Image: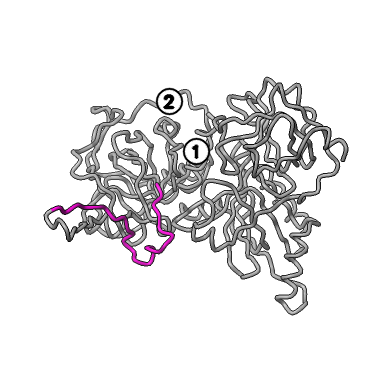
Amino acid sequence: MNNEMNIGNKVYLKDIESLADDSHLKLRVSKIWNFIRNNIVLSIEMIVMDEEGTKYQSRVFNQNFSRFGHLLKEDQSYIILKPSMAAVKNGFSVIGQRQTITLDWRTIIKRCDNFSGPINGFLFVEFNSIVEQTCPRQSFFDVIGQIVSFRPLEASDPNTQRHYMKITLTNLKSVHLQVTIFGSQAHQLSQYLKSNPTVTCVVIVMQFVKLNIWDGIGQAKSHYDVTKMFINSEIDEINDFKKELKVNVNGGTPEKSIYTLPSYASSYIDDFKGDFPLKTISEITEPLKPMKFVLVGKIVNIRQNLRWCYEACYKCGKKINKVPKPNLSYTTPDNISETIEIQCLDPVCNDENFHVVLKYIIPINVQDHTGTIGFTLFDREAGDSMQLFPNHMNVLKNRKFAFLVEITSYNVSNYNNIYSVVKLTEDVDIVSNLESKLEILTTQSVSLNEVPLESDDVVENVQKDVISQTDESFTPSTVDKSSATSPLKISTDLKHNLHDIYDVDCMLRYLEFKAERD
């Protein structure tokens, strides 16, 4: 205790604004990682916690690595004197504050062995709040639950950070939550499940996960660097959860089987193996009936002249409705003003939690040997700051894919031939097999070597440019009639590899990850 008196009064993080040179912080490092850009470590990033359980983000810039890099360890505690405060610019805010505790040339730290605060300081959120998207949206949170199903590890990408597993958790109220785990932790969980096939009750804690929205439903996803994972660990929170499970089954052992679902790769392959008809562009130019079909073609253009996002309901994902509302004045009846009230077209969504989110809607041009047509990749939440920009999508240009595409009832009723991509793959075996099935067209061939397709050229005049509501999704109603054009030259400098098979959400998540790192 004398040491603490010699270094001044202890200040808690809630009062950090009053920290002076003659006072100190006593903090535990909950998580530590490196922030890397262009293969250079720019800073050591930390989440620190005081004895009251309050967390803050902290960092050491590379010019001070020699002073602190060898001292800082995860799950250890320190007394810190004379830190600085800096704005969050390099990287992102994990805890939600816009400032970080920075250890610089003035800072003094020493190891502390009498930290009396919580060990982990979990802040669990209810599954319902995640599913309904009322949980924190701009900061990380923690979840605990029992694994009831999982899909095998997807590890086709050469970059192990982009390997992932999808699991389903249930809480003590039997509410289910979908969680996506990336990188080394996906491998760790996969290995645990393989090594313990007889274990029927696997309780997992995911600390520092973030909200992910897919098809209007809230889910959780890990972060490559930040998330911590505890699998059936001997910690109080997991032991207490298991005790509650036993109470719920009248004192017995919670023998809930863990179901192994088909891998996404195998289920996607099935979609391209004959469940849906194989079409060419010339066959689907006219939207005659609602259907799904498979098409093989090359992405020849990422449309730059159309909006890449739209305002959507946070819950159902449908386009919001802006309703003019007159403001009448009884004292000056001639003075009538108007405000815009934002609503969802579905009345069920217009509750006290209603808010608007941005969603991606990315227009592309796809070409095969019969013509060119417009498709859209969409229905992925963009967040408050659009991290995905046109230049990040250019990696897809001039690459051949098999597309699973949907013609909706909206397309048919409005004679709109801009269709939505459901899934896509560039797996060589799948693409080659589909190409071999295409019958040789007996109609007169059209020359594909006359009109080059420039960056923002449209195949036909744009008749209208809106996003329209359908029963299940949105279809952009920019009508570009299918037409024969020449393919662009194939790029010889493709330095990036995407997943062999993925849905639109996985692809956009990868491109966001790339944008964050670049």
Asked if residue 283 can be seen in this view, the reply is no
Residue nearest the observer in this picture, 19 or 356: 19
Disc 1 crowd rating (10 Å Cα; few below 14, some 14-19, many 20+) is some
Disc 2 crowd rating (10 Å Cα; few below 14, some 14-19, many 20+) is few
Residue 448 drawn above or below residue 26: above
Residue that numbered label 1 is attached to: 512
Residue nearest the observer in this picture, 82 or 32: 82
Residue type pointed to by label 2 = Ser
**Image location (x, y in percent) of residue 342:** 31, 55
Residue located 38% across and 67% down the image: 348
**Image location (x, y in percent) of residue 487:** 33, 31
| Residue range highlighted in magenta | 335-358
On screen, residue 205 versus residue 269, left or right, reads right
**Image location (x, y in percent) of residue 304:** 32, 33
Residue located 15% across and 56% down the image: 332
Residue located 20% across and 40% down the image: 462
In front of the other: label 2 or label 1? 1
On screen, residue 376 versus residue 207, left or right, reads left
Residue that numbered label 2 is attached to: 491
Q: Is residue 347 magenta?
A: yes
The image quadrant that residue 199 belongs to is bottom right
Residue located 33% across and 59% down the image: 344
Residue nearest the observer in this picture, 494 or 518: 518
On screen, residue 474 versus residue 491, left or right, reads left
The image quadrant that residue 198 belongs to is bottom right
On screen, residue 495 versus residue 360, left or right, reads right
Residue type pointed to by label 1 = Glu
Residue 352 drawn above or below residue 463: below
Residue 121 drawn above or below residue 365: below
Residue 196 drawn above or below residue 115: below
- Give the distance between the C-alpha atoms of the residues marked 2 and 1, in whole angstroms: 22 Å
